[in-house]
């Protein structure tokens, strides 16, 4: 059944009245006792249909306001028009990933995957809900949903804890930054592939949205050029590789992600410095400090961020750029490059058991001040690991949870 203007109006009214009654918009909080077990986390019974897709009668949808459940089903139906979309939904369903809505504030992301909770949320305060028509709303939500399913896939591929080396204080900052870049580029390439598939099925709504949405347009154009020039490029992954590579041409967007990676590392090192000044009252902090910025992310793991369930490994295609090519690794923002290099020196001091003082962090700020008034100046708005303003995350807590095999504190790690 088509999603109508009345359905969209009912959805917005449902959210409005929930807010008016002071009810929380979002999900029930969940904690998985075994987050490393994708298929059956926490002993939750599976509800997969015979074709691999959940039949739309999941218990969480039954508890959701009817109008919101109707929208989720419409989004899922749209994604299922794509072969890749269906495969992503199967993986999400096997991991009991929930889809729903969350009031996350204006100016924030339009959709996010909360990996600790395994939940994809569409922001009811974002531009998404200012869409003029029901058709465009479902198309826009589906495009963003495909992006977030790309992050779901990264969670599934690596497993909770192992897949987030870009959040690990013991990982090289340069590798962390590159990992975040490839994760985002792969998620964009994923959403563009789904939009193309849906277009080929006779529905151009997602493709039309991709062509006029910031952050998606260049990837859609790159994919389309390759696909029109050689239709086989879609099946063999070359079109998706073109979309992936195009993400790195937007230096402004890339710098926003780099900025948050560098700022995060600074916060982590600041925390370790406080521990060091007090003779490491937390023994785990001492271990992290002795390995700060040491670990490298291998080429295979870096390419796995772009793995897709359709059997096409677009980052492993012959003739493509090496994963460490300058196209992917360049630092066009000179301030970020200088601050990154400085923090790497601070991390080395920790590894060599040298004292780290406030002067080390003052120097970081001094480097930033040198670029005031230039195109590389620090933005006024602080951003998270994926270019969105959020609170700091305890890296030590994340590291400790991996070491002990327990679930980390759930955070919105992967956002669009």
Image (cartoon, grey):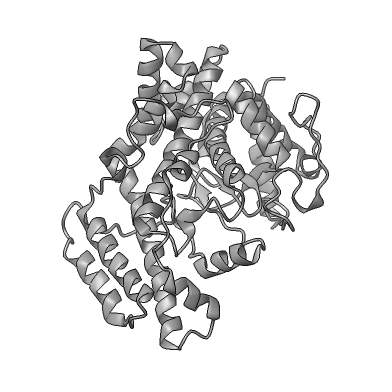
Quarter-of-image position of residue 58: top right
Total numbered labels = 0
Q: Quadrant of the N terminus?
A: top right
Q: Is residue 16 left or right of residue 54?
A: left
Residue at (54% x, 80% y) in the render: 283
Q: In front: 278, or 73? A: 278
Identify the image quadrant of residue 292: bottom left
Q: Position of residue 171 (x, y in %)?
A: 43, 60
> What residue is at 21 percent from the left and 67 percent from the top?
367
Residue farthest bottom in this picture: 278
Rendered position, 118 above or below 267: above
Asked whether the viewer can see residue 83, the reply is yes
Kindly identify the residue that appears in the image at 61 percent across and 21 percent down: 83
- Residue 25 in the image: state x and y as whole percent: 67, 51
Q: Pick the residue in front: 23 or 63.
A: 63
Residue 152 appears at what percent x and percent y? 59, 42
């Amino acid at each position: 059944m088509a999603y109508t203007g009345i359905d969209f109006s009912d959805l917005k009214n449902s959210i409005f009245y929930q807010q008016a009654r002071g009810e929380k918009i979002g999900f029930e909080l969940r904690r998985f006792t075994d987050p490393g077990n994708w298929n059956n986390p926490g002993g939750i019974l599976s509800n997969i249909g015979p074709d691999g897709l959940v039949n739309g009668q999941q218990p969480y949808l039954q508890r959701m306001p009817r109008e919101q459940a109707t929208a989720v089903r419409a989004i899922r139906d749209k994604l299922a028009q794509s072969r890749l979309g269906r495969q992503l939904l199967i993986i999400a369903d096997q991991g009991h990933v929930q889809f729903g809505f969350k009031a996350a504030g204006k100016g924030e992301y339009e959709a996010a995957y909360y990996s600790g909770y395994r939940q994809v949320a569409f922001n009811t305060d974002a531009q998404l809900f200012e869409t003029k028509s029901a058709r465009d709303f479902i198309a826009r939500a589906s495009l963003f949903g495909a992006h977030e399913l790309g992050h779901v896939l990264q969670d599934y591929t690596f497993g909770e804890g192992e897949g987030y080396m870009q959040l690990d204080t013991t990982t090289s900052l340069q590798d962390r930054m590159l990992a975040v870049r490839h994760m985002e580029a792969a998620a964009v390439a994923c959403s563009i592939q789904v939009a193309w598939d849906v277009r080929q099925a006779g529905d151009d709504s997602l493709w039309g949205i991709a062509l006029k949405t910031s952050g998606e347009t260049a990837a859609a154009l790159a994919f389309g050029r390759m696909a029109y020039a050689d239709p086989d490029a879609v099946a063999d992954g070359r079109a998706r590789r073109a979309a992936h590579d195009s993400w790195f041409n937007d230096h402004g967007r890339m710098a926003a992600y780099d900025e948050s990676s560098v700022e995060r590392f600074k916060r982590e090192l600041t925390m370790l410095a406080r521990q060091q000044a007090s003779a490491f009252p937390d023994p785990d902090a001492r271990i992290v400090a002795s390995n700060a910025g040491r670990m490298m992310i291998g080429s295979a793991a870096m390419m796995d961020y772009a793995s897709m369930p359709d059997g096409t490994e677009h980052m492993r295609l012959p003739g493509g750029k090496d994963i460490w090519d300058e196209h992917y690794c360049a630092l066009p923002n000179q301030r970020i490059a200088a601050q990154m290099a400085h923090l790497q020196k601070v991390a080395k001091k920790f590894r060599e058991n040298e004292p780290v003082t406030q002067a080390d962090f003052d120097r970081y700020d001094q480097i930033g001040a040198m670029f005031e008034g230039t195109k590389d100046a620090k933005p006024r708005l602080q951003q998270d690991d994926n270019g969105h303003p959020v609170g700091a995350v305890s890296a030590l807590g994340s590291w400790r949870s991996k070491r002990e095999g327990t679930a980390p504190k759930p955070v919105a790690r992967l956002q669009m």
